[in-house]
Image (cartoon, helix red, strand yellow):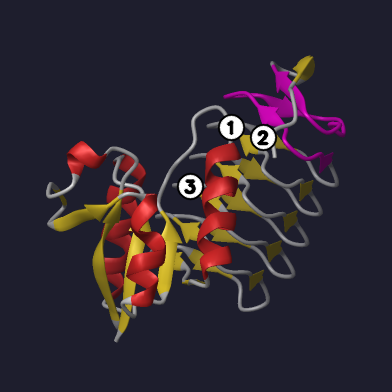
Amino acid sequence: MKKVILIGAGGHAKAVIDILKKNNQEIEIVGLITKDAADIGEKVLGVPIIGTDKELSELFNKGIRYALIAVGSVDNNFLRKKLYKKVANIGYTFINAFHPSSIISDYARFGTGNVVMAGVLVGPDTIIGNNVILNTGSIIEHDCIIEDHVHVAPGVKIAGGVTIGEASLIGIGSVIIQGIKVGKNVVVGAGTIVLEDIPDNAVVVGVPGKIKKFREIID
């Protein structure tokens, strides 16, 4: 049985716990890692909060080898990207979490550390990178590329042949038409309809989507 720690202890962590328990996988969730030491000893859906990121190396040395980032994102994915790199550098192996109601093509390819929520559809020859969130009810059609650390929010519809660059956030209910290339570190606002390619670091909102501003790059 794989002993796993989840990095995060908020609402997104609840969704991840729910997925892992529904799947009846050979997984034991040992505990949750939080940013606030005051939360240690509390429980989230019955899973204990066992430490902060300062304890990650110690837990690894005690024999826990598997992890999953269970932190969501509201306006950026910088924290999730940073945590993934830190945990990977310690030596942890990342698992994937697929909700049993998700519909995944046999011809889609996934990296590691991904969370796929209820009702998600992923089409054939689509490539999903590492540490990606495909949130509830999102559709990623055929021949798409979703790069590392991307968050596709609930209800997003991505047509065929779309590329989403690293660490971009695609807001709830947005639509991206076929063949579009979305750059790195992009934010697509809720309900936006994307009809044109988007450059790196842009914030795009509206119907049709227009660039509102550019973001500062944070690595």
Using the image as rendered, state which of residue 84 and residue 45 is in the foreground: 84
Name the residue carrying label 1.
76
Label 1 element class:
loop
Name the residue carrying label 3.
135
Pick whichever of labels 1 and 2 is earlier in the sequence: 1
Identify residue type, mark 1: Asn
- Residue 62 shown in magenta: no
- Residue 202 shown in magenta: yes
**Residue located 71% across and 54% down the image:** 147
Q: Residue 100 got which mark?
A: none
Pick whichever of labels 3 and 2 is earlier in the sequence: 3
Compared across the picture, whether 82 is left or right of 186 comes to left
Q: Is residue 98 visible?
A: no
Mark 3 in CB contact with mark 2 (< 8 angstroms): no
User: In the rendering, at what x and y percent does residue 131 appear?
Assistant: 57, 57
User: To which quarter of the image does residue 2 belong?
Assistant: bottom left
Q: The magenta stretch spans which residues?
A: 181-205
Name the residue carrying label 2.
175
Using the image as rendered, state which of residue 60 and residue 138 is in the foreground: 60
User: In the rendering, at what x and y percent does residue 85 appear?
Assistant: 59, 56
Identify residue type, mark 2: Val
101, above or below 207, in the image: below
Task: Check disc 3: other Cα within 10 Å, few if <14, some if 14-19, many if 20+.
Answer: many
User: In the rendering, at what x and y percent does residue 211 appear?
Assistant: 80, 17
Label 3 element class:
loop
Q: Nearer the viewer, mark 1 or mark 3?
A: 1
Q: Nearer the viewer, mark 1 or mark 2?
A: 1
**C-alpha span from label 3 to label 2:** 14 Å
